[in-house]
Amino acid sequence: MADASLLILPGDGIGPEVMAEVRRVIAWFGDKRGLKIDVSEDLVGGAAYDKHGVPLADETMAKAQEVDAVLLGAVGGPAYDNLDFSLKPERGLLRLRKEMDLYSNLRPAQCFDALADFSSLKRDVVAGLDIMIVRELTSGVYFGEPRGIFEEGNERVGINTQRYTESEIDRAARSAFELARRRNNKVCSMEKANVMESGVLWREVVQKVHDEDYPDVELSHMYADAGAMQLTRWPKQFDVIVTDNLFGDLLSDIAAMLTGSLGMLPSASLGAPMANGRPKAMYEPVHGSAPDIAGQGKANPIACILSFAMALRYSFDAGAEADRLEAAVETVLAQGLRTPDLLGEDGVSPVTTTEMGDGILAALDASL
Ligand code: IPM
Ligand code: MG
């Protein structure tokens, strides 16, 4: 019997080609490390729309609820730009997050030494950077009601609602404090308590959770705009940042770019523990579907491969194997393997998506 089950949803654009490399990595762990994962595959986003007329079929949603973890590639593309809002590829992703109740989105931003010169910031600002953004993922302005475009007098008004309950803030805060304890024991919470009531409540609840249950963790608060500024000024001051859904969307893109390439960063979205003790979980690269380079062998598979490493760590109790995979990625970067998103050094020619996969498999072999 398999130790664990994984549902793969490659999605659109470069999703399928980066996922093909992940499948080889999964097979390697099966063959060489005895890690038996029962892998199934299905459609999401535009690919699901093309087949079923919806961005996520109900059967796929049901399957996602049953497996130990979901690994998603990317969704979206220009072919779907004019679809009704409810049918857009992104709705498939948002439905998975919401119905699986994946409230805690972990977005690490780690600067690999070999890539420190790729950042738009100075090497010394980013070298050795290792921060974690915890983004609340199932509430806030992404889901708050009322929402919509309404008639008001002789014009239309577009409405979205920022809404947070105490329990939603509480559980996001706990997940950040727990993580901080396993890292450098520091949490910075970001909101706009100077302008928004939801921010006032956010700050209060985070402080209360801290004082009652995590007084050993160092906690600070920052307005999110100042936080964005500090992230680009001196990012190494942070360890864990906890923030709401929309600010987390923005701040995690900033943090990602500090590391040089969006093609490098994984993420984990975690919910409450299931009956088997594992958290409900979905893993996905932070990058999007990049339709402009899809199907050309130019995509960097590392973000998706590192997302699988996070699955090894958080869903499959295989932290040591996650370390092994992350070290293999570090090895190929140190060897100078570069997909086109990582070019810039003199005399380096790019490798293809598959060649990057080959390099990582060779580094894994060498690790035995
Ligand atoms: C992200 C993306 C998504 C979001 C989109 C694709 C719906 O930007 O995961 O950061 O806004 O959450
Ligand atoms: Mg985003």
Image (cartoon, rainbow, N blue to C red):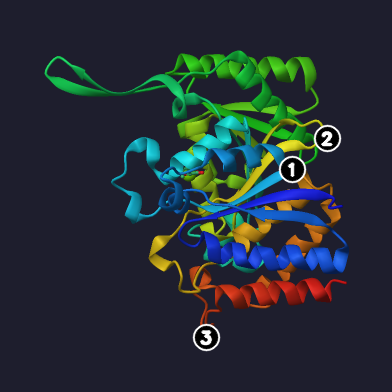
In the displayed structure image, the side of residue 94 where residue 150 appears, left or right: left
Q: Earlier in the sequence, mark 2 or mark 1?
A: 1
Label 2–label 1 contact, CB within 8 A: yes
Residue under pointer 1: 68
What amino acid is labelled 2 in the image?
Answer: Asn
What amino acid is labelled 1 in the image?
Answer: Asp
Residue under pointer 2: 276
Mark 1 lies on a secondary structure that is: loop
Report if residue 232 is visible in the image. Answer: no
Mark 2 lies on a secondary structure that is: loop
The CA distance from mark 2 to mark 1 is 9 Å
Residue 25 place in picture, x, y as percent:
72, 66
* Figure check: 297 above or below 200: below
- Residue 347 badge: 3
In the displayed structure image, the side of residue 31 where residue 344 appears, left or right: left
Label 2–label 3 contact, CB within 8 A: no
